[in-house]
Amino acid sequence: MIDTQRVAALALHFEIRRAELVDLVRQLVERESPSDDPERVSALAAWVAARLRSAGIEAATVPCPGGGDAVLARWGAPTGGHLVLGHLDTVWPAGTLAEEPFRVEPGLLRGPGSFDMKAGAAVAIAVLEAIGRGEVEPCSGGALLLTGDEETGSAASSQLVVAEARKRAAVLVMEPSADGGAAKIARKGVGTVHARFHGVAAHAGLEPERGASALLELARLAVFADALGDAEVGTSVVPTVAAAGSRKNVVPERAELTIDFRFWTDAEGARVLSALTGHRPLDGRVSLEIGGGLDRPAMEASPESLAVYHRAAGIARQMGFDLPPARVGGASDGNLTAAAGVPTVDGLGPAGGGAHARSEHVYVEELPRRAALLSALLEERG
């Protein structure tokens, strides 16, 4: 464990800079960066990289074709140590700031993207600036990666995330904490299936028997999918979006259905995907095209990742707060790094609430102590 006096010193160091941390969150929030606006995301990435370079940290933007640029910063040895991971994009469209401006209220701050996850990014940036000034001294090399398309599935950045993670001994994900300030030790995997049915149109009143209803087959698949869920093991399979038909008096010739499924283990994800892709229409005149698949693997807790979590929880106790473990249904880039075999602990960002909602907020007291926690994890010798 890291020395208690050193932990206290780090806590004091960042507590003194609480106002600077709040202002850094403000600067990030006020630079809007919706996932579907690569230019804005890339502009924010360039601003972050320049800021880190001015603090003496090696940092650059990395193009991610199909999404906004990522920020990659490194210190020390090129391998080993930690990858600090997060994202700069948000779910909020440009212009939201005019309706929901950044603001500080007693004990908390608000603003679009503040909780998920610009406060976590601010903590990581502040810690790297402290490394550049010699105020935090990591025990080994490491890297910070902030991507620009996490909220939309990381299609553009996933290879970069996995490649950087495999260079390091562990991954610390600065996504917001779970309820009660908990760290996330496991996340559900996510899959999406898109089904398209092609039937035979016919007059619904004169000769319905000549038709082959794509809508009926959609309904059968929806019921079949629902039955694949297993509440006991936490597997959910939910038909979410459907469309069918053209006119009220025509047997539907076409139909489309989207199915979302979530799972704690990759074996469960494979079971559900196999069943869905193996489904066949009851009416042989209806053809079925199924696309999609596994969007993110499950982030399963391993002995190695739990060891990293227990280190973090121990440091938190030294600082005077609890860091309970949590298993959550949502996915993040931590799913990718864990599936790549790199010990991963998620949800190390500040506590708050209202992710993806207009009630989004962060507890101000969390900013300095999460910065101190990250710094201590980087300084601690395993």
Image (cartoon, helix red, strand yellow):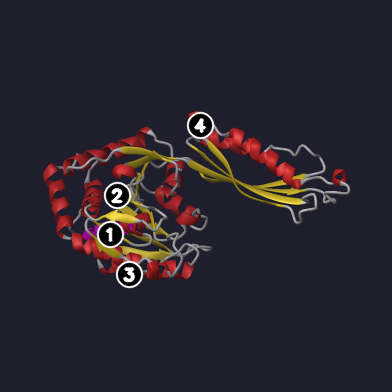
| Residue at numbered disc 4 | 231
| Residue at numbered disc 2 | 351
Q: Are marks 3 and 1 in contact (CB under 8 Å)?
A: no
Q: For marks 4 and 3, give the one nearer the viewer.
A: 4
- Quarter occupied by residue 105: bottom left
**Distance from Cα at disc 1 to Cα at disc 4:** 37 Å
Q: Position of residue 68 (x, y in %)?
A: 47, 64
Sequence-earlier tag: 4 or 3:
3
- Asked if 349 appears above or below 97 in the picture, the reply is above
| Residue at numbered disc 1 | 109
Residue type at mark 2 is: Ala
Residue type at mark 3 is: Ala
Sequence-earlier tag: 2 or 3:
3
**Distance from Cα at disc 4 to Cα at disc 3:** 48 Å
- Magenta segment range? 121-131
- Asked if 216 appears above or below 50 in the picture, the reply is above
Q: Is residue 76 visible?
A: no
Q: For marks 1 and 2, give the one nearer the viewer.
A: 1
Q: Residue at x 80, y 53 (%)?
A: 249
| Helix, strand or loop status at disc 1 | strand
**Distance from Cα at disc 2 to Cα at disc 3:** 27 Å
| Helix, strand or loop status at disc 4 | helix
Residue type at mark 1 is: Leu
Residue farthest left in this picture: 5
Q: Residue at x 82, y 43 (%)?
A: 285
